[in-house]
Image: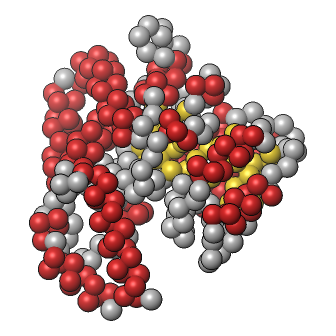
Amino acid sequence: MRGIIVARRRTESPSMREHWTLDPAVTFLNHGSFGACPRVVLEAQADWRARMEREPMQFMLRDRWALLDAAREAVAAFVDAPPDGLVFVRNASEGVNAVLRSVELAPDDELLLLDHAYGAVLNAARFVAGRAGARVTVARLPWPRASVEGVVDAVLEAVTPRTRLCVLDHVTSPTGLVLPIERLVPALAERGVDTLVDGAHGPGQVEVSLRALQPAYYAANLHKWVCAPKGAAFLWVRADRRAGLRPLTISHGHTMAEGKKTRLHLEFDWTGTDDPTPWLCAPTALEVMGGLLPGGWPALRARNRAVALEARATLC
């Protein structure tokens, strides 16, 4: 049956496939793990790298700051977020780890996760909790029949007076559930619990408005459903939580004079020598993917959902 679906898609969308460099002999179905980058975006990255290698000192020490700010503005606009709270990281796991390592935990404090959480995030939470004498509690979601009310109740019932932070998936990695974070974030805030949204599969798949959602933290990939190069991801931090947040690597940004850049941006924008080109390509990826269909990103998300539903109906 899968071969039938693939054959039909190949007949219907030859122009769509031409945007990627994927091996035509391989049926690429698992886009969610690492993503795939359009040809035009890869060419843009090659141009950025050529510019960087042509004059490394100028690019790394002078040009990169304004270039990162421009990329930040584009990504912030896409997820409807104030750009002053957005920093670039290499993947959502790095953003999650930065938050977990920055949160101050006392013995017997609790980190609340879900039984659909990504394994790497669960590992990080257990590591951080173990060092502080805290513990990880796991809320069990109703499955496979998961209703909005059932999910909300399952999470809130797991909250205790010792819960300091709840890590919520926007779209669960193992099961593909879109969680009702617009209900959970304010409900947890009313109980004095901060939220860290693991948005690894959010941007590009679902509409994101961080101005409306207002979690304490939101970490997400751009290399998956936005199709930016590998190494493109971001972390957004609410204004009242920025002062205590630190990147995983403390470098020169920790002591640079603030000037026109905030401490948050300085610390995350410079964590040592790296390749910033995946981040600089994010605006190109947003433009390319948003231009694939006449209706832009909303039309692309609708098409992707329709294709997924058709495949489900055929297989099930």
Name the one closer to the observer, 186 or 231. 186
Determine whether, in the image, residue 218 is placed left or right of residue 83.
right
Q: Number of callouts in the render?
A: 0
Vertical position of residue 46 compared to residue 112: above or below: above
**Quadrant of image for the C terminus:** bottom left
Where is residue 200? Give x, y as percent: 48, 53
Residue at 63% over, 51% down: 183
Please give the name of the residue rendered at 74% of the width and 62% of the height, measured from the top-left corner.
154
In this picture the colour scheme is: secondary structure
Location of residue 115 with respect to 82 vertically, above or below: below
Picture quadrant of residue 63: top left
> Quadrant of the image for the N terminus?
bottom left
Q: Nearer the viewer, residue 165 or 148?
A: 148
Q: Give whichever of 59, 151 is nearer the camera.
A: 151
* 243 or 101, nearer to the observer: 243
Residue 250: percent from left, percent from top: 55, 26
- Residue 224 seen in this snapshot: no
Q: In this image, 264 relative to 125: left or right? A: left
Quadrant of res 306: bottom left
Q: Position of residue 257 (x, y in %)?
A: 48, 8
Q: Residue at x 27, y 39 (%)?
A: 283
> Quick check: 14 left or right of 164?
left
The residue sitting at 63% across, 69% down in the picture is: 147
